[in-house]
Image (tube, rainbow, N blue to C red):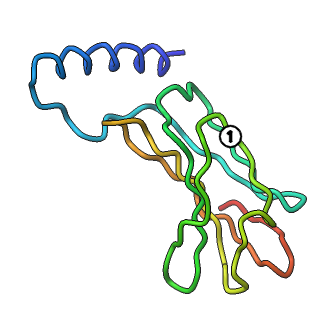
Amino acid sequence: MICGTIGRIIGSVLSRRIEEGTEIETGIDNCVNVKASIKDEQLTWTIPGSENTIDHYTILAQQASQWINVAELPAGSNAAKLTALHLQPESRALCVEAVGKASMLNHFSGPINYSPAKSQSQTP
């Protein structure tokens, strides 16, 4: 509940600063933590705490040494079918990014090991 209260206070302060025209810090921590896993051909994630500071979710796939955006889902989402992500055979890991609303930090799950041939997950 503390983070939810902080989120409401931050929103109020930001509104006043914007009205005043003063500069605001970028990347205010919104107390969000992303926990993701893969089970039964589905990527799922949870956000302990309040989700009201999240704009949307981005799913990233590691291909070779790069992370590629494979999907964007609206706030309130908590799962994606792996078949819907159209992952390349060289995909080695997946990650969920909780993209914060304006001036809020983005947060990432840890990488989840993934093999398209056999979808077993290991959360570090």
Picture quarter containing residue 58? bottom right
Q: Residue at x 57, y 64 (%)?
A: 60
Q: Residue at x 58, y 81 (%)?
A: 63
Q: Residue at x 47, y 47 (%)?
A: 107
Question: Dot 1, how many residues are within 10 Å of its Cα: few (below 14), some (14-19), or many (20+)?
Answer: few
Q: Is residue 33 left or right of residue 82?
A: left
Question: Foreground: 6 or 97?
Answer: 97
Q: Is residue 70 left or right of residue 29?
A: right
Question: Foreground: 35 or 73?
Answer: 73
x and y percent of residue 30 in the render? 42, 31
Question: Foreground: 70 or 39?
Answer: 70
As shown in the figure, which amino acid type bears the numbered disc 1? Ser
Q: Is residue 87 above or below residue 103?
A: below
Q: Residue at x 52, y 45 (%)?
A: 98
Q: Is residue 22 above or below residue 71?
A: above
x and y percent of residue 72 in the render? 58, 53
Picture quarter containing residue 28? top left
Q: Is residue 74 left or right of residue 21?
A: right
Q: In the rendered picture of this protein, how many numbered marks are placed on residues?
A: 1
Where's the N terminus, which quadrant? top right
The residue identified by callout 1 is 77
Where's the C terminus, which quadrant? bottom right
x and y percent of residue 99 in the render? 47, 45
**Residue projecting furthest to the right:** 40
Picture quarter containing residue 88? bottom right
Q: Is residue 113 left or right of residue 25?
A: right
x and y percent of residue 74 in the render? 60, 41
Q: Is residue 39 above or below residue 85?
A: above
Element carrying mark 1: loop
